[in-house]
Amino acid sequence: MKKDFIIAIIALIIIIAAAYILTRSEVIRDLDKYDNCTILSAKSLYEKMIFNISKENIEIDQNETTQINVSVNKTVVTMIYESLSDGECIIIRDNISMVTYSEEDDKTTITFSWYEDQYTKTHVYYYFMGNITDIYKVGDDVEITLTLKHVDIETNSTKYNIDIFEEQWDSEQYFINNVQSILIDKGLKNMDPSIIEKI
């Protein structure tokens, strides 16, 4: 009886020690994440955006043997985040203002909003695969962990010099096939819900 009691105590100590080690490693891993990422609200990230649409005249050699040059007018879309670098980890930490699910697209839209002034409200949208409206509600504080990706792509009519997120990226061909002029979201895929979590 006494021997069984001692074995039970030893087993309990081992379980507690293992739980402590696992919990401590999770905490250290989480702290590392915050050390290596830039943490911003949706508004702060939005304010870093430099957005511009311009026209550019491009000369193309149509035929190298006859040296015929053709001038083409192209729209140039520039959308970059000031002071952020390609490959940089960014954590968006904010409060959800709206959550909607589109059955047709099988995607959930998480919206962050703020007032620029008394009358002007700005919204920023992040799109996730599937229906996660049972997990995330209006008012939830969340973190979205993203990796900045810089892309230079040229279609028949438009040149894109843009910062997007690795988690939205499918391929250059997917982007070219789906993008609609300045509506670059159409050329990006919905993100995996594993990158968003409540805090």
Image (spheres, rainbow, N blue to C red):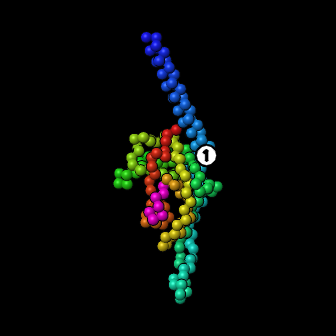
Q: Tell me where the magenta segment starts and ends, as one range.
A: 168-174
Residue beneath the point at 52% across and 32% down: 22
- Residue 190 falls within the magenta-colored stretch: no
Q: Residue 116: tell me if it is visible.
A: no
- Near-viewer residue (129 or 166): 166
Report the residue that reaches farthest toward the bottom: 66
Query: Which element is circle 1 on?
Result: helix
Q: Relative to residue 79, is residue 62 depicted above or below?
A: below
Looking at the picture, how far across and down is residue 167, in whole percent?
A: 49, 53
Which amino acid type is marked by label 1?
Answer: Asn
Residue receiving disc 1:
36
- Near-viewer residue (27 or 109): 27
Report the residue that reaches farthest toward the front: 3
Residue beneath the point at 54% across and 80% down: 60
Q: Quadrant of the N terminus?
A: top left
Q: Residue 174: tell me if it is visible.
A: yes
Residue beneath the point at 49% across and 46% down: 195
Report the residue that reaches farthest toward the top: 1
- Near-viewer residue (45 or 176): 176
Looking at the picture, how far across and down is residue 24, in whole percent?
A: 56, 32
The image quadrant that residue 35 belongs to is top right
Residue beneath the point at 61% across and 46% down: 36
| Pointer 1 local density, CA inside 10 Å: few below 14, some 14–19, many at least 20 | few
- Residue 170 falls within the magenta-colored stretch: yes
Looking at the picture, how far across and down is residue 124, in whole percent?
A: 51, 52
Looking at the picture, how far across and down is residue 14, in whole percent?
A: 51, 24
Q: Is residue 128 toward the left or the right of residue 89 in the image?
A: left
Q: Relative to residue 138, is residue 176 depicted above or below?
A: below
